[in-house]
Amino acid sequence: MPDLDLDRAWDLHPQVSVRPEPFGALLYHFGTRKLSFLKDRMLLEVVRSLKDSPSARAACAAAGVPDPDLPRYNAALAALVQSSMVVERTTP
């Protein structure tokens, strides 16, 4: 799976709903009818921070992701892009 560019702006797809759960969250895409599980509460915070951050790297920083963990969160975000849950933001 290719890496996601952490220095670009990303956001949840407009048709994705997030339901927080004790283990993390459920993401449901109403367009594709796909369901994704976030099993990491910090990843949920990253996903929530995407819309207000200038980049995925900034969203990770806002959520408190330590630099050594960035590759793992990059891979998780890339998987969410592959499943159309997260899309690149084209407007500021």
Image: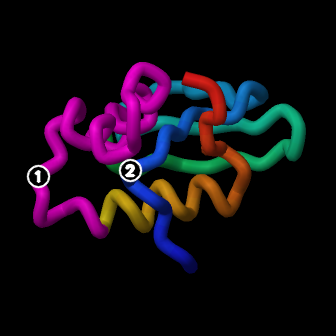
Which part of the image, by quadrant, shows the C terminus? Answer: top right
Foreground: 86 or 22? 86
Residue 61 position (above or below residue 81):
above
Disc assigned to residue 66:
1
Magenta stretch holds residue 60: yes
At label 2, counting other C-alpha atoms closer than 10 Å, the crowd grade (few under 14, some 14-19, many 20 or more) is few
Q: Amino acid at mark 2?
A: Asp
Give residue 73's position: percent from left, percent from top: 34, 58
Colour logic: rainbow
Give residue 30's position: percent from left, percent from top: 83, 32
At label 1, counting other C-alpha atoms closer than 10 Å, the crowd grade (few under 14, some 14-19, many 20 or more) is few
Lateral position of residue 36 relative to residue 39, left or right: right
Instruction: Tell me the chief SS of the magenta region.
Output: helix
Q: Amino acid at mark 1?
A: Pro
Give residue 17's position: percent from left, percent from top: 66, 26
Which part of the image, by quadrant, shows the N terminus? Answer: bottom right
Foreground: 60 or 55? 55
**Mark closer to the chain start, 1 or 2:** 2
Considering the numbered disc 1 on the image, is that residue within a helix, a strand or a loop? loop
The magenta stretch is 42-71
Give me the residue at 67% from left, 62% from top: 82
> Mark 1–mark 2 contact, CB under 8 Å?
no
Give me the residue at 43% from left, 67% from top: 75
Q: Disc 1 vs disc 2: which is toward the camera?
A: 2
Q: Which residue is mark 2?
A: 7
Rendering quarter of residue 74: bottom left
Can the viewer see residue 21? no
Of all residues shown, which one is farthest toward the bottom? 1
Distance in Å between CA atoms under marks 1 and 2? 16 Å
Lateral position of residue 88 relative to residue 62, left or right: right
